[in-house]
Image: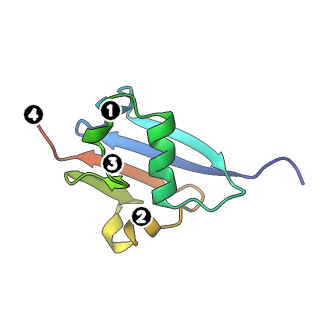
Amino acid sequence: MMGTPELKIVLEFSAGAELLFGNIKKRQLALDGSQKWTIANLLKWMHSNILTERPELFLQDDTVRPGILVLINDTDWELLGELDYELQPNDNVLFISTLHGG
């Protein structure tokens, strides 16, 4: 077996959400494919690794705060099980901030 399998996904941020992540609107990730990745795990990883500004504007407890929309492959995550959704290869996860001003 060649090394550790990778789970490749794309993260996108828009409408101001990118400002919390170093102002980078699109990131391609290669996560450790030997484990199961849910959105819950992904949010923890994002908090540890790429969230640069004011985490309270993105996370509240263990989930995204109200006002952040999450779309997985253009589908509202609420239809996919939210935090329990298991990421699949080449998934696109889009975070849109609906919070303006402040």
- The numbered mark, 2 or 4, whose residue comes first in the sequence reads 2
Label 2, label 3: how far apart the Cα atoms are: 14 Å
Residue pictured at 60% horizontal, 58% vertical = 89
In the image, which disc is placed on residue 95? 3
- The numbered mark, 1 or 4, whose residue comes first in the sequence reads 1
Which residue position holds label 2? 83
Q: Secondary structure at mark 3?
A: strand
Kind of residue at badge 3: Phe
Residue pictured at 46% horizontal, 58% vertical = 40
Expressed as whole percent of the image width and height from the top left, the position of residue 98 reads 17, 47
- The numbered mark, 3 or 4, whose residue comes first in the sequence reads 3
Label 1, label 2: how far apart the Cα atoms are: 20 Å
Tag 1 and tag 4, C-beta contact below 8 Å: no
- The numbered mark, 1 or 3, whose residue comes first in the sequence reads 1
Q: Secondary structure at mark 2?
A: helix
- The numbered mark, 2 or 3, whose residue comes first in the sequence reads 2
Residue extending farthest to the front is 61
Which residue position holds label 1? 20
